[in-house]
Image (tube, rainbow, N blue to C red):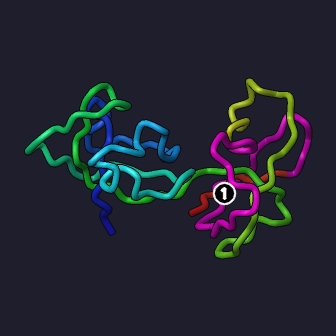
Amino acid sequence: MSIITAVGTNQAKEGYVFIYAGPVNECRDCRYKNACINLEKGKAYTITAVRKDKNHECKVHERTITIVEVEKIPVERCIASSKAIEGSLVTIEPNPCKEMDCEHYRKCNPLLHEPDEKYRIVSIVGDAGCRLNKSLKIILVE
């Protein structure tokens, strides 16, 4: 199901994927805020259509925003293999790790993470191949 929202004009391209970080202080008094801050913080979205009829001024997004249609998409995360059950609800707990150059680091320690939020496991992608020999699976969650 598509959601109508606004993004920075430079990002307004079909197929562009982003994680919504939430509103900032500059949004508080904006007349377009209802079009922009209608997504779920920390969730991933892909732009499915761009409405090119008009751009609007914005103090945050490179001076202008464009109205787009987006769909929420699942994101990859890493969890303990014992908790990786397709269809189940899980709380993603950060995996303490100092291997910041690991290809899976952000899947284990996402930037926009709500500690008590529940996610549904859409599918299991595979083993994470953890450098610290933890038994981790890469999963898709929504």
Residue 24 in the image: above or below residue 4: above
Q: Residue furthest left?
A: 53
In the displayed orientation, state which residue is furthest to the right: 133
Disc 1, SS: strand
Around disc 1, counting alpha carbons within 10 Å, would you say few (fewer than 14), some (14 to 19), or many (20 or more)? many
- Image position of 112 with respect to 69: above or below: above
Query: From the image, which quarter does the N terminus lie in?
Result: bottom left
The C terminus: image quadrant: bottom right
> Quadrant of residue 85 in the image?
bottom right
Q: Is 101 left, or right, of 96 in this rendering?
A: left
- Write the residue at 52% across / 58% down: 74
Using the image as rendered, state which of residue 56 and residue 76 is in the foreground.
56
Q: Is residue 140 above or below residue 31?
A: below
The magenta span reads: 107-135
Which residue does the numbered mark 1 point to in the structure image?
A: 139
Determine whether 90 is above or below 130 in the image.
below
* Along the viewing direction, whichever of 135 and 89 lies nearer the viewer: 89
Residue 98, horizontal then vertical, whole percent = 86, 28
**Magenta segment: does it hold 32?**
no
| Amino acid type assigned to the residue bearing label 1 in the image | Ile
Residue at 19% x, 38% y is 56
Q: Position of residue 46 (x, y in %)?
A: 38, 50
